[in-house]
Image (tube, grey):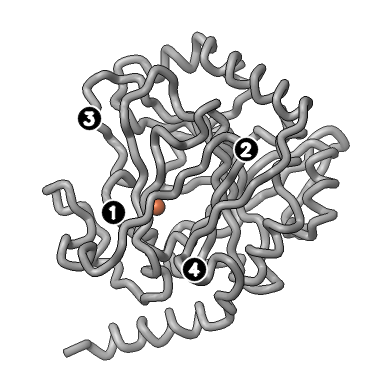
Amino acid sequence: MKSINQLFKDAYWKLFNSFCPLKGPLSLFGYSSFPYTVDDQFLEIRDNLLDSLFHSDKLNTFLYGKPNGTPVHFYDILSTHPALISCLSISHVSAIRQYLGAKSYLDAVYLSVIKATDHSNAFSNSSGLYHHDSVGHRLKLFVPLNSFGNTLFPTKYLASSHKIKWQTYLNQNNGYGQRIPPSIVSNYDEHIINAPFGSLFIFDTNGIHRGNYNHSTENRVILQFEFSKHSINPFGEVGPSTFYLSPFSFDYLSKLSLLRLNLISSDGQICKHVGLPHRSYSSSFALLSDFI
Ligand SMILES: [Fe+2]
């Protein structure tokens, strides 16, 4: 039998998430893929960015000897490479808002470089085990920038697991290569979200999902966005985060009405979105301008 405390928590979770309409293309399975426009400018910027990352002595030194799955997240990517924001369009924003609601906003944006060149195929990242993120409904948008997209490392998602109020205790790494009991995983169809270069995907992290940390000849590079409805989330360290924008990327996101403008400060050259300064995994956050 549930304790009063647990009943209260369950009711609060339901209320907290009840304002999300959960409609549109994300509603059926909890995720969806979308194309975006890759023009010559985008391609040139992507090529130069990957070249600088793969030849960054500082980054290669940091990742040397580390297992696959080791991430570094650069939260100034839209300050150093503002034109990358062109992958985000009104149709993506529409899908996000049909799902989370009209008053949902961008919480975070960062470029993730994830080690994939260790030959052992062992991985260090617990997101490679089936899990949900224990924070209610919030969306992540992944833009895989490698020439093979994410096809060597496709995210896996348990279809239609996104509307369940999951118990947080189910989410702990039990030390046996599991976070979610196999008896629950087997209740759902496993979908593989393939996103070749030129497509992106959006998923509700309340659904059960896992990353993939296969060995490759190059590290994974993913532009990541996070969206949510609430500026404070009592269920975990999510919500508005700190990231940097150039005036161009600031204007672009402003036109899509995605910014929490009360959190923006500007010195004319750099706009700073000030949210949670540190997350529990903050040691993996860095500035790209320090690395390339
Ligand atoms: Fe996750």
Residue located 37% across and 75% down the image: 164
Q: Position of residue 198 (x, y in %)?
A: 62, 38
10 Å crowding of disc 4: few (<14), some (14-19), many (20+): many
Residue located 60% across and 43% down the image: 199
Comes first in the chain, label 3 or label 2: 3
The residue that disc 3 covers is 122
| Vertical side of 242 occupied by 186: above or below | below
Name the secondary structure under disc 4: loop
Quadrant location, the N terminus:
bottom left
Comes first in the chain, label 1 or label 4: 1
10 Å crowding of disc 3: few (<14), some (14-19), many (20+): some
**Amino acid marked by disc 2:** Gly
Q: Position of residue 289 (x, y in %)?
A: 65, 22
**Amino acid marked by disc 1:** Tyr
| Label number found at residue 196 | none
Q: Is mark 4 within 8 Å of ligand 1?
A: no
Mark 4 to mark 2 CA distance (whole Å): 26 Å
The residue that disc 1 covers is 130
**Image quadrant in which you'd find residue 152:** top left
Comes first in the chain, label 3 or label 1: 3
Name the secondary structure under disc 3: loop
**Image quadrant in which you'd find residue 247:** top right
The residue that disc 2 covers is 198
Position of 74 with respect to 64 (left or right) is: right
**Image quadrant in which you'd find residue 168:** bottom left
10 Å crowding of disc 2: few (<14), some (14-19), many (20+): many
**Amino acid marked by disc 3:** Ala
The residue that disc 4 covers is 137
Mark 1 to mark 4 CA distance (whole Å): 17 Å
Residue located 35% across and 15% down the image: 64
